[in-house]
Image (tube, rainbow, N blue to C red):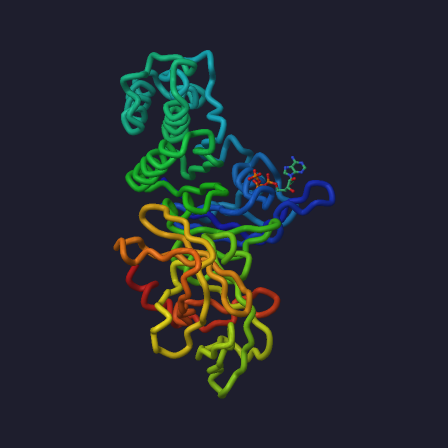
Amino acid sequence: MQEHVKIQQISKYFGENKAIDNINIDIGKGEFFTLLGPSGCGKTTLLRTLAGFYQQEEGNLYFGDQHMNNVPAHKRNIGMVFQNYAIFPHLTVFENVAYGLKARKVKKDEIKARVTEALDMVELAHLKDRQPSQLSGGQQQRVALARAIVIYPGLLLMDEPLSNLDAKLRIKMREDIRSLQKRLNITTIYVTHDQEEALAVSDRIAVMSEGKVQQIGRPHEIYLSPANKFVANFIGTTNFLDADLEVVDAENKAIVTVEGVTLGTNLLENVNGKAIYSIRPEQLKIYETSEARPALVDGEIIDATFLGESVVYKIRFNSGTVISAHEHSIRYNMLRKTGDRIKVDLNPDEAVIFDESGEEVLNEHKNTSIKETV
Ligand SMILES: Nc1ncnc2c1ncn2[C@@H]1O[C@H](COP(=O)(O)OP(=O)(O)OP(=O)(O)O)[C@@H](O)[C@H]1O
């Protein structure tokens, strides 16, 4: 049975320090939900509060209709996987996975069947008699995963489960975790500080900073339509350019002036004055100086880094501003080099505009079609 998790206005203090601050999240049954943010933002504290290891000072937690505030950790029916595996070194793989079932007084025959089933799911059945010291890091993490799912938890909590694995294995394991989660349709809350991992595995992501949720959305929404400057900067890379906004009609149609060119845009609200124009390196388009289309910005390539699939350019505009732009390296004769003069299209259709305090002011209409088709 998978849970619908309702986190309502939860705050948790350590002394004076408010580690999580008024968190509201609704997580659907069977959803893969990720808490993403930099070190110290409160991800682990929130996860441990959900598990019942910490008691929040404010707010309510519900699993389905059940109020969980006073339910102790061992009665929450949660499976947990941690960064450091936390498997018992003196027990075999089979015994490690069987542990939670024995504690629940499940009958011997059923234990055998369920442990075998769980080990099959994580592709470890052939290693069931090994000791943990005879396993690789990835295999140990599979044992931890089998141990978490064997109890048929209503909720699976994972705290940086891939951090101790090397880069290639991390990608394989995250794919395996995602497909297992889908197969079992188990509500999962996953903690990571790795934005690529979060984008790859999640149905939805909550981006956190300083104990607060900055934005909740599906991976492409967070990437393409960040709610504020923090999110734009934390997820992927982006260029922030100083801009000026001038609203020109009652529908909040505005012109934005950036690097000396004026571009049209639609604003959510009537905001005039200083703004921040955020555009990702791959959203910029580079042209030869002979290109005649309007609203291009003149610049010079000051650095070119060839990465195989793409080339990363550093471009200095005539104003002195330096930006980063990516181009696919499809054709040999398209590669640009340091010192080349070029023109750049700032691509207002893809840009996000923030007011001076860093909140998004752009009308989100541009992403509507994406939300419906992805
Ligand atoms: N047991 C504790 N006692 C006191 N302060 C704590 C405790 N645990 C966490 N904190 C503080 O609460 C804040 C949030 O910490 P938390 O571990 O939840 O962050 P995190 O986002 O999981 O970071 P990381 O990715 O580094 O694990 C930090 O300021 C941290 O110092």
Q: Residue furthest bottom?
A: 249
- Quarter of the image holding residue 343? bottom left
At horizontal 57% and vertical 49% (from top left) the residue drawn is 60
Relative to 132, does residue 211 appear above or below in the rendering? Answer: below
Image quarter where ligand 1 lies: top right
At horizontal 40% and vertical 66% (from top left) the residue drawn is 342
Query: Observer-nearest residue: 368 or 81?
Result: 368
Relative to 304, does residue 365 appear above or below in the rendering? Answer: below
At horizontal 40% and vertical 50% (from top left) the residue drawn is 28
At horizontal 34% and vertical 74% (from top left) the residue drawn is 291
Q: Where residue 161 sits in the image (x, y, percent)?
A: 45, 33
Q: Is residue 254 left or right of residue 123?
A: right
Q: Quadrant of the N terminus?
A: top left
Q: Residue furthest right?
A: 16
Q: Where residue 3 sits in the image (x, y, percent)?
A: 41, 44
Question: Can you see residue 29?
Answer: no
Query: Observer-nearest residue: 120 or 2?
Result: 120
Question: Can you see residue 103?
Answer: yes
Query: Observer-nearest residue: 27 or 3?
Result: 27
Q: Residue furthest left?
A: 331
Q: Is residue 345 left or right of residue 318?
A: left
Q: How many marks?
A: 0
Q: Where residue 77 sits in the image (x, y, percent)?
A: 45, 34
Q: Quadrant of the C terminus?
A: bottom left
Q: Where residue 352 sits in the image (x, y, percent)?
A: 47, 67
